[in-house]
């Protein structure tokens, strides 16, 4: 295959040259819009959605640095060079933990206001908040991949075609574009699954996180690492081990929610369409169901009933 090189220095230069803090702050309106469009509107207010969206971006940005510090610490223990300045897994863990803390604080404030007013105040569910921030969390990952594409971090392995990387001065596999497309596909898939009967409130974030970790595990094989970094559990990287851990946790939470909570009414505009389809399917199954054969005594009884019916009509 002929080499196809795209020089990153000539693309996205004006936009991605922004300072990292300003770049991620641009994502707040985008995340808010996506959360309001795809999340469950009747479960969180606009103010709550905006607050948790902004908190997710701010603390997610901080968490990406914390995750990189932990990763680099592990590398130093092995005697390897530090590699990352930010990691997406630090963002994921920080967002989940900080959201939990903020929801608990909001619950306490609401309870206090209710006691002062001597009126019950509607509480907020952690599951609803997780559902509300899930679309924005995935779209934020897609958004950050454009900066990764320009800076050249997390670039792919040397390839016969792809993008030019100024860090190793060769053409590499376009792993950032693949990861962005994968994450956007997960966003659409989770939204589709949320319209199904098995879905429970709170599953959306863990569905998205589990699917992302599953895909990222295999994408790690196409990312560029020095051989010394692939030493965890055989030939895996530390981030692949993190993928396995987070994937198992997400599956556990999904199973727990499925078995603990009953199904809720289907949200969104698809609700009447899906319910109509399910009703049509139920009618078809009833028609296809085999009818029980009548016994001899039942046939005699039905014949007698028909004859008495005819006699009664004649008398009339």
Image (cartoon, grey):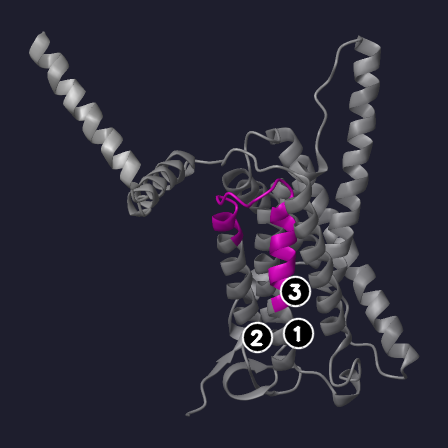
Q: Where is residue 29 in the image (x, y as percent from the top left)?
A: 58, 43
- Label 3: which secondary element: helix
Quadrant for residue 302, please give it. Answer: top left
Magenta region: 190-214
- Label 1: which secondary element: loop
Side of 309 relative to 141 (left or right): left
Q: Residue 154 carries which label?
A: 1
**Callout 2–callout 3 Cβ contact below 8 Å:** no
- Label 2: which secondary element: helix
Query: Given the current orientation, which residue lies at the most extreme left position?
Result: 314
Q: In which quarter of the image is the N terminus?
A: bottom left
Quadrant for residue 153, please give it. Answer: bottom right
| Distance Cα–Cα, label 1 vs label 3 | 16 Å
Q: Position of residue 269 (x, y in %)?
A: 41, 36
Residue 152 in view: no
Tag 2: Cα neighbours inside 10 Å, few (<14), some, or many (≥20)?
many
Q: Residue 175 carries which label?
A: 2
**Callout 1–callout 2 Cβ contact below 8 Å:** yes
Q: Per the image, is 195 magenta? A: yes
Determine which residue is flagged by label 3.
213
Q: In this view, does 301 lie above or below 166?
A: above
């Amino acid at each position: 295959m002929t080499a196809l090189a795209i020089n990153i220095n000539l693309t996205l230069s004006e936009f991605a040259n922004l300072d990292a803090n300003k770049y991620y702050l641009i994502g707040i309106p985008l995340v808010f819009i996506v959360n309001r469009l795809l999340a469950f509107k009747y479960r969180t207010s606009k103010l709550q959605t905006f607050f948790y969206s902004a908190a997710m971006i701010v603390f997610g940005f901080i968490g990406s640095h914390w995750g990189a510090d932990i990763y680099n610490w592990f590398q130093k223990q092995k005697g390897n060079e530090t590699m990352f300045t930010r990691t997406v897994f630090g963002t994921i863990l920080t967002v989940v933990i900080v959201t939990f803390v903020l929801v608990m604080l909001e619950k306490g404030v609401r309870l206090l206001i209710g006691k002062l007013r001597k009126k019950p105040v509607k509480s907020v569910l952690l599951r609803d908040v997780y559902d509300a921030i899930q679309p924005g969390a995935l779209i934020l990952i897609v958004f950050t991949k454009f900066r990764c594409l320009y800076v050249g971090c997390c670039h792919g392995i040397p390839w016969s075609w792809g993008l030019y990387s100024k860090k190793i001065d060769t053409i590499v596999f376009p792993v950032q574009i693949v990861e962005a497309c994968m994450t956007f596909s997960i966003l659409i898939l989770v939204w589709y699954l949320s319209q199904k009967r098995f879905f429970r409130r709170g599953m959306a974030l863990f569905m998205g996180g589990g699917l992302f970790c599953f895909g990222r595990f295999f994408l790690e094989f196409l990312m560029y690492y020095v051989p010394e970094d692939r030493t965890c559990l055989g030939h895996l990287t530390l981030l692949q081990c993190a993928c396995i851990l987070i994937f198992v946790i997400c599956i556990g939470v999904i199973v727990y929610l499925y078995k603990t909570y009953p199904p809720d009414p289907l949200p969104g505009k698809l609700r009447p369409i899906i319910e109509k389809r399910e009703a049509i399917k139920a009618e078809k199954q009833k028609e296809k169901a085999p009818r029980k054969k009548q016994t001899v005594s039942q046939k005699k009884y039905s014949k007698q009933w028909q004859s008495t019916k005819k006699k009664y009509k004649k008398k009339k």
